[in-house]
Each structure stands twice: as C-alpha cells, then as structure tokens.
Image (cartoon, grey):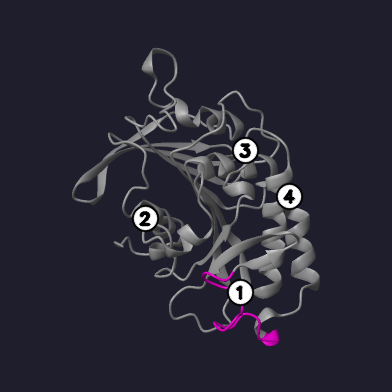
Amino acid sequence: MRTIVLIFALFAPNAAAQGSALPGNPCHLNTPCPVGERSYHVREPDGWDGANPLPVMLHFHGWARTGKLPINHERISGHTKRRGVLLIAPNGRNKTWRFRGGREDVDFADAVLRDVMKRYPVDRDNIFISGYSFGSAMAWRYVCESGNDIRGLFAVAGTLRQSETCPEAPAVVRHVHGTSDTVMRFPAGPNGDRLNPVRLWRGRLGCGTTKDDGPYKIVDWLSFDRYRWDCAQGTVILDLHKGGHFIPHGWLGRQLDEMLGLKPSYP
C-alpha cells in the first residue's frame, strides 16, 4: 500500500481539475465504478465542495450483500456523509470475501484505492478500513496484508484467528463485538477472557497494560465497555456490548469523530 500512495502522490493528475471529483461523477451511489472485471460503490459527503481532499473510509460489506448496502445504510453512510468522509464500498466476488487466505481480495481493495485516488482528491493521512461481519474479517485481512499506510481499522463483529501472523498493521485498531453474538461468535479466550478478540493486534503492535476506560453510551439503549492499550507502534481499542450480531447505532460515527478530532455527535 505504501508504494501505491507514493506513486499517486507524485504522478496522479489533480482529480478536481479533471472534473471527475465533482458530485456529478458518473459512478457514485448505486452506479458502481468499474475496476477490471469487478467494481465498487462510492458516496461523497454532504456539502463537499468538489475540491478539498477527503478522508476515506473503505467498508467491506457483510456476507450475501453488495456495496450498495453500505452506501445506503444509515449506520454506515449516515455517519460518513455528515463528517466529510468519502465512503468506498467494494463489491465482493459472489457477494462474499476470501478473508481466510489468499491475496485476491486484498489486491482488489488495493486496486480500488488506486482508482479512488484517480477520481478524487484524497487525504492520504486519513484512510480508514472498516467492515461488518464477514466484511469485518475481510477488513482485518486487508490491514494484516496491506495496512502500513492505513490510519485506522474500524471492525464490527468479525475477526481473524488470533494466531494469525500479520506482516503489516494499521496505526490504530478499533474493534466492537457483542458478547452474545452467535453469528460471528464472540471470540472469548481461555477462561472466558473478554479481551481476547484483539489479542492478535495487541501482540503485533507491542501493547502494554490494559486500561479500562469504563462504560459509555452513544444511544440510550446500548452501553459499551471500553478497553484501551497504548502500544509501541499504535493504539488498540476494544468496545464490548451485551448484544448480538449487528452494527451498533452511532459506533462508526463515534470512531470517526474521535480519529478526526470532531465533536462527538449522533448520528
């Protein structure tokens, strides 16, 4: 990924000057942007002037879905469009992702980001990868293989095996999981260790002592317990709730608020 970013920083034409970054871009919303034989969807933020560089959140959809769902989903695009963030939603082959191994979908996501950088002025210091369910596991796989230039991983209810070895990693990992999840089952560790879902990243980033930040709420009906690790190579945050398999209301927006230095808000 680092090579991709440097190449486009040096040689990519100014997207705004080309006119391809304007809201009238022919491939946005439900009209996909082609990348080889595959494609992705894009949603620009509300009120964007068509010129200023945009933070990017690339979101991997869940199993049996397509990129159309994230760009129309209030718990995903409902947050990006209000925060000046460009939402990118790749389409999985056969509506799924090969997150257990192989580079096909990692390379595809790299190609998607290259294409986005040709079409839009991108804030390359603020590229985030997110996903839900199977898409969350794919987001883990992507940053595991191509994450050195990614600022943050926002993962919702899906992981890789904690025994994986990751050659690359993002600067910040933020993962949320329901302890009652039976779809992408909550990955408790030995003796019911609730902190096990991010053990891989705690080791990879050289994390120290666990900090219990205590409970917090974004909406009245759902409480999170937040655990934080300050690490030699970044930060890891684990948010736990007592529910099942879903995208919590406001969670992705709160992560963007905190990472971009915005006043926390809902939605």
Q: Which residue is mark 1?
A: 27
Residue drawn at x 41%, y 30% as measured from the top left: 210
Residue drawn at x 65%, y 83% as measured from the top left: 16
Q: Earlier in the sequence, mark 2 or mark 3?
A: 3
Foreground of the two, 143 or 101? 101
Q: Which residue is mark 4?
A: 107
What distance separates the C-alpha of mark 3 from that of mark 4?
12 Å
**Residue 89 placement (x, y as % from top left):** 55, 59
Label 4 Cα crowd, 10 Å radius (few <14 / some 14-19 / many 20+): some
What distance separates the C-alpha of mark 4 from that of mark 2?
29 Å
Circles 2 and 3: CB atoms closer than 8 Å = no
Q: Earlier in the sequence, mark 4 or mark 2?
A: 4
Residue depth check, mark 1 versus mark 2: number of the one nearer the observer: 1
Magenta residues span 17-31
Q: Which residue is mark 2?
A: 254
Q: Which residue is mark 3?
A: 99
What distance separates the C-alpha of mark 1 from that of mark 2?
28 Å
Q: Amino acid under label 1?
A: Cys
SS label for mark 2: helix
Location of residue 98 with respect to 55 vertically, above or below: above
Q: Quadrant of the C terminus?
A: bottom left
**Residue 36 placement (x, y as % from top left):** 76, 61
Left or right for 80, reference 118: left
* SS majority, magenta: loop
**Residue 103 placement (x, y as % from top left):** 73, 42
Q: Amino acid under label 2?
A: Arg
Label 2 Cα crowd, 10 Å radius (few <14 / some 14-19 / many 20+): some
